[in-house]
Amino acid sequence: MTQTPRYSLAASYREGLRSMSAFSSRSAESGLDPLLAELVKIRASQINGCAYCLDMHTKDARALGETEQRLYAVSAWWDTPFFSAAERAALRLTEAVTRLEHQEVPDEVLDEARRYFDDEAVGKLLLAIVVINSWNRLMIVQRPPVGDYVSPHS
């Protein structure tokens, strides 16, 4: 199903888009491993059903050297041998923050992330997760065309 764009933040609230872009840039410049950041973005986008962001971040991940096998397995990361313990902790944290089923992130999820990442890195991960969840929601509302994105990393 091809979706027709129905709203444009750039046209209706340009300052809001600039603010969101600055927030996103700050996260991207945090020093978080770029491939790990892409895995986080892909998993949150899968959960949220954001086709635009999935198209974008799978292309960015490929351009950064991510394998097809791992990209295909992100949606079932827990049941594959393809991800490191640290990546698993980051993906588990991504799911907990994205879903917030009980309005909290379980202590054991945060504790697991802290076994593999120092406090600053956990903060960077959390910011990346919040940023992609925000973009997912904005893109789902706006319905931009999917498929035309070209990675700047290509």
Image (cartoon, rainbow, N blue to C red):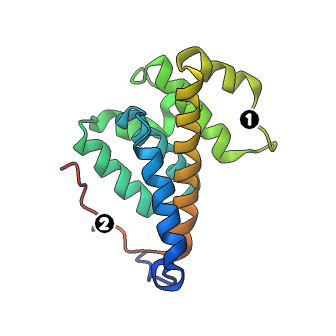
Task: Say above or below: 95 vs 82.
Answer: below
Residue positioned 35% across, 35% down in the render = 35
Position of residue 74 measured from the top left corner of the image (x, y, whole percent) = 45, 37
Task: Say above or below: 111 vs 37.
Answer: above
Position of residue 49 measured from the top left corner of the image (x, y, whole percent) = 54, 58
Task: Say above or below: 107 vs 46.
Answer: above
3 left or right of 60 in image: right
62 left or right of 79 in image: left
Position of residue 124 measured from the top left corner of the image (x, y, whole percent) = 53, 36
Question: Mark 1 and 2 residues: CB-CB less than 8 Å, in contact?
Answer: no
On the question of residue 79 being in view, the answer is no
Residue underneath mark 2:
147
* Residue 50, numbered label: none
Badge 1 or badge 2: first in the primary sequence:
1
Position of residue 71 measured from the top left corner of the image (x, y, whole percent) = 36, 39
Q: What is the quadrant of residue 81 in the picture?
A: top left
Residue underneath mark 1:
105
